[in-house]
Structure formats: C-alpha cells, structure tokens
Image: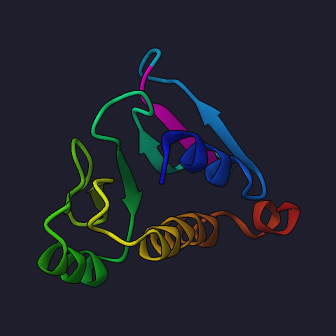
Amino acid sequence: MTANALRRWCLARPGAKEEFPFGEQPSVFKVGGKMFALSALQSRPLRVSLKCEPELGEGLRATYPAIQPGYHLNKRHWVTITLDGSVPDETLLELLEDSYDLVVAGLPAGERARL
C-alpha cells in the first residue's frame, strides 16, 4: 500500500475528511469529526494508526511484528502499523474498514443516517 493509495482509500469513505490539526503532518482522516486513521504520509517507512477492538489489537500485535500499540494514542484501542509489506494489503484494508466502521458506529444516529 502506497501513501497515495492509503489517502485515496480513506477519502473514498462516505463523509470522510482529511485534516491537519497537528501541522503539515500527519494527515488525520475523520468521519463525523472523529478520527479513524492517522498517518504521516510522507514519512518512510510509511505508518498508519487505526482504531480497533482491544482483543483484535492484542491478536494482531502477537501475529505481526509490524503492528504495535498506537503511537501517541490510546494503546488499548489503537494500533500503529508499519507498512513494510509484512502485513498483507487485504488485512490492512480490512483493518482500515474496521476502524472506519467503529467510528461510524459511535456517531449519533442522525449523523450515521446522513452518511
């Protein structure tokens, strides 16, 4: 997964926006004003932080050395993935989708309906 592909995927989600609350980097991808992905798209190696269920995060960290607790985030509910090719793109896309879905599920019903 390239930085451009990651950005395109995130912005293709209904209601998704890219913001820069911390300066020029990192890109913060939000839906309904809530973050679902965070990445310094110009950094190498490329990394992305995603929201995930705590139990899933534990299993992912045990399976993939490239998946670590969320960097500067709640370590129980976020993971940071180094995109070094060791995590299959299919798995990464599923985790991105899960992160987006978790955030959408936490939005008020009216906000969810508008998406």
- Nearer to me, 98 or 42: 42
Q: Determine whether 53 is above or below 10 in the image.
A: below
Give x and y (percent) for residue 44. Answer: 29, 33
Give x and y (percent) for residue 31. Answer: 65, 51
Q: Going by the picture, which residue comes out furthest to the front?
A: 85
Q: Determine whether 104 is above or below 24 in the image.
A: below
- Nearer to me, 79 or 103: 79
- Give the residues in magenta: 25-31
Judge whether residue 85 is colored magenta: no
In the image, 8: left or right of 57?
right
Q: What residue is drawn where x is 26% and y is 48%?
A: 73
In the image, 99: left or right of 73?
right
Give x and y (percent) for residue 82. Answer: 27, 52
> Which quadrant of the view contains residue 85?
bottom left
In the image, 43: left or right of 113?
left
Give x and y (percent) for residue 98. Answer: 51, 73
Q: What residue is drawn where x is 38% and y is 72%?
A: 88
In the image, 32: left or right of 83?
right
